[in-house]
Amino acid sequence: MNTLVKKTALFSCLAASILMSSCDKSDDSGTVGADFSVENSARAAQADNVVENTLNIMESAYVETEGGEANSVSLFTACTIITIIPNGDGGTIILDFGEGCTLSNGSIVSGKIRLEYGPIVSATRTITYTFEDYTYNGHGVAGGGEILRELENSNGYPSSTVNETITVSFANSTITATRVGLRIAEWTEGVGTGTWADNVYSITGNWDTTFSNGFNRSGEVTEALIRKLSCIYLVSGRLDISQEGITGTLDFGDGTCDNMAVFIFNGQEYPIILGL
């Protein structure tokens, strides 16, 4: 059975520090305290942020080089070497960030991302992506998957459906997180304007993330998550999550670019800080 990725990705359950002392789970034998881990929840937030921002980098690279939307204001700064290797109706895009490169949105990346794509068939193109010694803000990223890019979906927007198996190696830690799933992103604003800064994506999906220390988390988007590329956080939408025997909902707000969200558990609302 396929699982779907949410973006996203980009949330933190730092609310767990509050819930550790205030939230219980009931079963037939009575009330059982939920065993929350603040550290694991913070790692989950980091993993989602690393993956979501990396997918946005790949999307921007394809759009700026082969997607017919060449930007006069690029996400990529002079330290990025972009190589395009044509191959009939397809080709390869190699993004080489060297030993360290700061992009226009402030992301610090290194290593390489390789995008290989075939011909356009029925207004769609399949793109395979892999990583080579790639890092995002100090975290290692390995694995890869496929992107099915539609020139125009049923809603009239360009969209990307991403299958992924991506492993994040956290900086200053031996723990890794592997996220498996499917992320669907509609490009709803900024098409054809010539700059990355006004691009807005509507993201749906769900995912499973497994950590090398045994921690597991799953999530499902129940209200489309909105990502503005000018903001490093998700700005609205809802995600249902399940971890450590409990379920809850993350509400990312009203569209304002800030680092706050609300975790809803057992009818109670807890403010949380979204982390990098």
Image: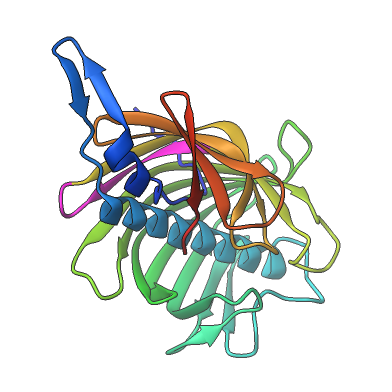
Q: Nearer the viewer, residue 270 or 51?
A: 270
Tell me the quadrant of the picture where the N terminus can be found.
top left
Residue drawn 45% across the image and 58% down it:
51
Task: Please say whether residue 207 is one of the residues in the magenta stretch.
Answer: yes
In the image: residue 274, left or right of residue 151:
left
Residue 186 spot, x, y in % from top left = 67, 43
Residue 125 spot, x, y in % from top left = 60, 49
Q: Main secondary structure of the magenta part?
A: strand
Q: Nearer the viewer, residue 93 or 142?
A: 142
Q: Which residues are magenta?
A: 205-214
Residue drawn 36% across the image and 71% down it:
139
Q: Is residue 217 among the parts visible in the rendering?
A: no
Residue drawn 78% across the image and 70% down it:
70
In the image: residue 38, left or right of residue 241:
left
Q: Is residue 112 above or below residue 194?
A: below
Q: Is residue 196 above or below residue 127?
A: below
- The quarter of the picture where residue 144 lies is bottom left
